[in-house]
Amino acid sequence: QLVPSVTTVLSMIAKPQLENWKINQALNSALTLEKNDLESIEEFAYRCKLDSKKLGQEAAKKGTEIHALIEQGFLGEGTSKTYEIIQAYLDDNFPNEEWIAEDSFCADSGYGGKIDLYSKSGIFIDFKTKDNLKGKDPAKLVFDEHGMQLSAYAQGCGFDDVERVSIFVDRKDTGLVLPFVWDRESQSKHLGMFNAMLTYWKLVKNYDSSVL
């Protein structure tokens, strides 16, 4: 039986920060591209949209490449500056853990996903890539959906009492890594929020994805 991924369920949530980023990219394209004399306003606007989407696709591609480098490190298939910095952070803050990278799961309640990294003791890690992280406070980079994602992963793997960590990596300076450890008090709230969204997804899609 097909089930939605955690990210598919979370896509039902409005993401004003992401939408604002898309608007800024479109405005940047409109300001930097030149309108051709024979081009209508509608044609120029369409070309600006395509250009701004290209920037988003390039950012996503870079994020995928960074994720792959980190994954290779934890799988013992290679090393990189980013992986070494993250591994050193984990060794300092969560020593003697056995880490599992890019593991998939399917929860009985009807969702699945692939986890960036987690430990057998119940520490769940998710990697995010962003631009211009220098001088940023990681506490201002996280949103509820980040915590919901980690809580959903933990529930899907059968963990109740967990540690959740969001780790941000700068797309250009991949040696710039900012970790954020979620407080345990928000775990139940984020789990409740995710489960509510899962119920909403099932009702909207008119599809009960629960594993029988």
Image: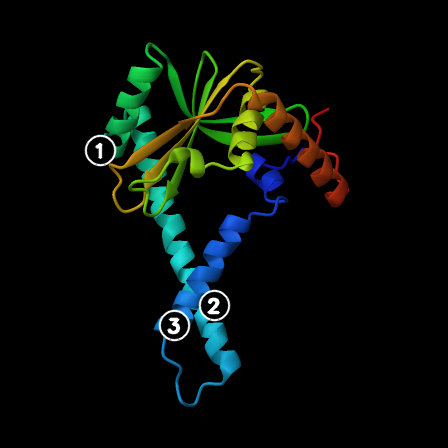
Report the residue marked by disc 1.
81
* Mark 1: few/some/many CA within 10 Å (<14, 14-19, 20+): some
Label drawn at residue 49:
2
Q: Is residue 74 left or right of residue 190?
A: left
Quarter occupied by residue 58: bottom left
Q: Are marks 1 and 3 in contact (CB under 8 Å)?
A: no
Quadrant assignment, res 97: top left
**Residue pictured at 27% horizontal, 37% vertical:** 176
Q: Is residue 155 above or below residue 72?
A: above
User: Mark 3 falls on what kind of element?
Assistant: helix
Kind of residue at badge 3: Leu
130 lies left or right of 191: left
* Percent x, y of residue 194: 63, 31
Q: Is residue 26 above or below residue 147?
A: below
Query: In terms of sequence position, does the residue under pointer 1 or pointer 3 come before the other?
Result: 3
Circle nearer the viewer, 2 or 3: 3
The percent coordinates of residue 190 (x first, y second) are 60, 28
